[in-house]
Amino acid sequence: MYEKHLMICGATGCISSGSQSVEEALIEELEKHKIRDKYRLVMAGCPGFCEVGPIIVVYPDEVFYCRLKPKDMAELVVKHLVGGEIVEHLLYKGPDVDAPARFFDTIPFYTKQKLKVLRNSGLIDPESIDEYIMRGGYSAFTRALDLEPPAICAEIKAAGLRGRGGAGFSTGLKWELALQAPAVKKYVVCNADEGDPGAFMDRSILEGDPHAILEGMLICGCAIGADEGYVYCRAEYPLAIKRLKTAIKQAEEYGLLGQNILASGFNFKIKIKEGAGAFVCGEETALLASIEGKRGMPRPRPPFPAQAGLFGKPTTINNVETLANIPLILKEGGVAEFSAIGTEGSKGTKVFALAGKIRNTGLCEVPMGITIREIIYDVGGGIKGGRAFKAVQAGGPSGGCIPAELLDLPIDYDSLNQAGAIMGSGGLVVMDERNCMVDLAQYFLSFTQKESCGKCIPCREGTKRMLEILNRITEGEGKPKDLDTLDELAHSIKDSSLCGLGQTCPNPVLSTIRYFRTEYEEHINEQYCRSGVCKALFHYRIDQERCTGCTACSRACPVNAITGVKKEAHQIIQESCTRCGSCIEKCPQDCIMITPVGRKADVSN
Amino acid sequence: MLKSVAAVETAITDPIDLSALDAIVEPYLGKKEMVIPVLQVIQDHYGYLPRPAIEVVSRLMYIPLSSLYGVATFYSQFKLKPRGRYIIRVCKGTACHIQGSPKIAERIEAILGVQSGETTDDLKFTLEEVACIGACALAPVIMVNDNPHGRLTPDKVKAVLDSYE
């Protein structure tokens, strides 16, 4: 028996912050004190709070240590593990707590969350099937084995689960269609091609609780009569792929995958296919083409994959998070438990990836129907650096932005659609007043334009034309009728593109025009970017009254465009300035102003 | 079914060692749906997809060279040119973009004198863009081979590059 279990976050975020060197230092300290075998160290899944990584949670004490460095390990071992005393200065501290917070439930980031899909992430060893089983894993699958396929589909339908990958189609209905398709061979596909920039919830689920996905796929196999499954995963997620492979091997050893599973007569095997870097492969028909070894290009529907999918056979394609919800619904009493959370049209919870100018970057799982304000201010801790909230981009390149006046919008499929955004896969990127909305639209469109597969003309040519116009606007060459042209193009592309990529890619442009039209007009009519992002459309100017001559800016300038004597007000040589922004980051007085080109008056800083 | 690589090799003048290909392609023979995994293994082996190697795959797997080229150019992961010892990938995810990744990319381009997609003349660095590496909490991030460098500012870029010999 171990005295304590130390769960070290081994997900990509914390590894990037250095959790592996923290683990090495911890092992070294334990060996130094010859107590290595008393403690169990686990590189666990993601507890979600990436901002304060690397994280170690000590069980059974449930103490949450964060922002750890290798040098902290000596103290953690001696004081906490040997001495039984909590190391105060390694606990969570922040403006949202009065005193250092010991446990999950005292950290504001966690208090409004409802961990269902992420129930095991960070709590169990993702490379141990036993721990998953101990937490009730695979019991929903064994229950499903005793049910008739239509009954399984009916339960999923009754629970009201909608696809978590973007469009929000009823999962139960999707399964029913595949069940009704007459064929001997059928497939289950897990879409783990999480391509939205700024979204990483599927990766965290795969890394933290891979068996939940396998169980979801097994249940789907029972429900539609399939005996083979594929997980299509981005190659950029090497750790997720490794954990999945381990999980599949363990499930095979336990007889949970293979022939005649648990003597039920049901056969199922799962293979992994790695993507090779193409955003369009998140679209289901393109994904299927990619699994078949072809260029990942979509095809017209019908026939829908439920009728003719992978290798021409009926196929059900579900997103990672959707599948992770399945065992929760199929367990005893799961339908009632699941549908008790959420709103009328959107049941259950949703995992969001919080990123951008938000204090608590990371992963959170909240009940459907919670407001954006609650997510951003209560869970997310508000805006970084005390600046003003401007907008949040929901749903990535297919979604839209939600401005400050809609902060009280409840998060559910239908409200988001009405606001011009989409649930998407659940990326929420927060922006403050230093972010330019025209630049954001241009960023997303240059992404989708690059990723357009080129098969259909509206998407291939239309995105190119829209991008040209946006490029012009950000360079100060915009024309008054550009906004109307953008609007017209956007609607043509939406109406006539072949697949979801084209049908949704104008959304970021439409929603930024809808909510931030003034900013577009300033760019076009006044050649002015008030956020100081579009380089041709502003100057930096040093406020001569407030500059103390500290020289921080002139030392930071990479092109020597700032002159001035120490302790006297400095000047910017406009001809040399490249507007890289190095000075504005360094100025302790906030006295470098963003001013319109050719205008003397200061507008904002 | 397996043709000798040596026979194929005589037709190719490029001095690329193709001896490993037999073993690489063997498990995938007759499985045309495995094209992408085959190319991935070959790229792991050579660091890129050398044309002579692709020609061998085409003959061994009975897939037209044009189809292989079609697949290799469709997916951004595949590279048809040799790359540097260190691959710098600038994350272009949304979180990185709004926190200044364009400025980071500009600074790297200025220091190395190459644009995205290019390799320095000494084959030391290749500069690439990546859609999102999912380390949004550390934005803006770059990866140099497998090492992430997060919370960057343009000023920190030089020190990061200098740390690679």
Image (cartoon, rainbow, N blue to C red):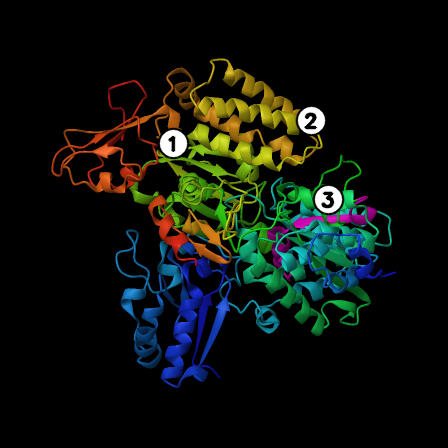
User: Position of A22 compared to A222: left or right?
Assistant: left
- Do callouts 1 and 2 point to residues on the same chain? yes
> Does residue A329 belong to the magenta stretch?
yes
Quadrant location of residue A70?
bottom left
Q: Is residue A523 above or below residue A121?
A: above
Question: Which quadrant would the C terminus of chain A be assigned to in this image?
Answer: top left
Whether residue A374 is visible to the viewer of this picture, yes or no, is yes
Helix, strand or loop at disc 3? helix
Q: Residue visible at 81% across and 56% down?
A: B8
- Write down the region rendered in magenta: A307-334
Q: Which mark is residue A511?
A: none
Percent from the top left, x then y, of residue A301?
A: 76, 36
Do the residues bearing badges 3 and 1 touch, measured as CB atoms within 8 Å? no
| Alpha-carbon span between mark 1 and mark 2 | 32 Å
Helix, strand or loop at disc 1? loop
Q: Earlier in the sequence, mark 1 or mark 2?
A: 2
Q: Residue visible at 23% across and 39% down?
A: A553
Q: Chain of mark 3?
A: B
> Does residue A231 belong to the magenta stretch?
no
Q: Which mark is residue A457?
A: 2
Quadrant location of residue A505?
top right
Task: Characterize the local packing of mark 2: few (<14), some (14-19) or many (20 or more) Cα atoms within 10 angstroms.
Answer: some
Percent from the top left, x then y, of residue A214?
A: 66, 61
Q: Residue visible at 50% across and 39% down?
A: A394
Residue behind mark 3: B69
User: Position of A392 compared to A253: left or right?
Assistant: left
- Do callouts 3 and 1 point to residues on the same chain? no
Instruction: Tell me the kind of residue under disc 3.
Output: Tyr
Residue behind mark 1: A533
Q: Chain of mark 2?
A: A
